Amino acid sequence: MRKPKVLFVFSKQRSENVTTFGGFEKRLRRFGGLEYAESNHLALENLAFEISNNRSVVTDLRTNETVKGYGFVYFKDWLSLPERAASLAYHLQAKGVPFIDAVVIQKGSDYHKLLQAYKLVSAGLPIVPTRFIPTDKIIDEVTKQKIHYPFILKDALGQKGQKNFLIKSLAELKKVVNENSDTQFVIQTYIPNDFDYRVQVYGYKASLVIKRSKQSNTHLNNTSAGGSAELIKLKDMEENLLQLAEDAAQAMNLQVCGVDILVNKQTNEAYVLEVNQGSQIVTGAFIEKNIPSFDNYLKKTISKRLKIKAAEKELLIKPIIGRHTYVSLPGLDLHNIIAKVDTGAYSCSLHAENIRVVRKNGKKLLRFDVPVIEKGRHFTGENQTCYIENYEIIEVRSSNGTQNRYRIETAVEIFGKRYTTKLTLSNRGSLKHPMLIGRRLLRSNFLVNVELSQRDID
């Protein structure tokens, strides 16, 4: 049987013998580990990424090999390069490769344009094809890969169009890279356009649209770069573009953001260019329209959260009940019955046999047998006879038709506290649990956590 390939990921390339790089793997093997697997290691600082809507390739520039064919990946050391680590994790997730620890995919700044591209693609949204190459290797890799000019070279963490260049030749690329050697860049395909849309999204809903058009001497549409601005009414905006902006906000989990949408003037294809957290609320164009939109959302959100907070305070005093819990019925002298908690059922029910009405001491009583249960749910084969005066006959509808059943009212004790409720008597002998607790008893009395269970298992 072929051994699986395991990959160990580190932030920086170091000596092959130190434990923060190749030495980690070597030491595992020295002490008898990894006999079941082939293994390799790489450094995040050497990785180049290429991502579009139908392609994701990660290449280790140290070996010029693509990161593929691995059955498992362990991120050993990654905190100093969290965006590259999270981007690799998204790549692995898309390829169906398991990795640990899962927290790596949650880290990294959403401002980083590579990580943002992976998040948007993971949500099925169209992006401008994006590459990330370590800055000191950009010139060599652009030449080697024959990346077509013109293309956009932009600061991976840039804002407001800063360090955003339209590169038309190798000479221009060398000049920009040499002057900004400490900047992380992404390379994006140039999309022919005359304008873009900034869609302000509040509460995952498009609230304002600004059409931004570039000046003739720049490729940037940003108003901060001198672009002109035109307010577009929501009803005049294409519905699919508004939906695209809202979906992008959802993908980035940003309730307040500005989504930049670019439309190719030759093909009419739309792309999510960027999602900007908390962008241009009190600055930029049309703030007299934007501020009221944001303030209205903020007012509603604050009001809603205060109501939820008040409700949460009330809920905090309620006990938490799990999928199964121990119940006593003191009025029937039944104790420590294991009950199933079922929020899909309205009423409570109890397993009972030989149900009939009898006269005792001059009173009409409902008589029924409940099998004796030990350790909550195991039937011993013996029966306990119960009598109760407070009962009624109800009509119950089920998939088997309509039936008449007896329903009793009695005290139920859970966690040492008594509640008066009604129990339907039915034969639950074929079911795992002799009692069922429904919403009628749960409501206003308990919070249900399905991760918990008091069931005692032999």
Image: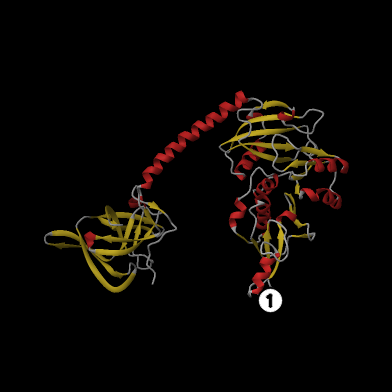
| Residue at image location 61% in from the left, 41% down from the top | 249
Q: Is residue 112 above or below residue 260?
A: below
Place residue 418 in its image quadrant. Answer: bottom left
Q: Is residue 277 above or below residue 24?
A: above
**x and y percentages locating residue 147 in the rendered image:** 84, 48
Whether residue 273 is visible: yes
Q: Is residue 423 left or right of residue 204?
A: left
Tag count in the figure? 1
Viewer-proximal residue among 453 and 400: 453
Task: State the quadrant of the N terminus.
Answer: bottom right
**x and y percentages locating residue 408 in the rendered image:** 25, 56
Residue assigned mark 1: 1
| Residue at image location 43% in from the left, 40% down from the top | 308
**x and y percentages locating residue 2 in the rendered image:** 70, 74
Q: Is residue 408 left or right of residue 106?
A: left
Mark 1: amino acid: Met
Viewer-proximal residue among 187 and 341: 187
Task: State the quadrant of the C terminus.
Answer: bottom left
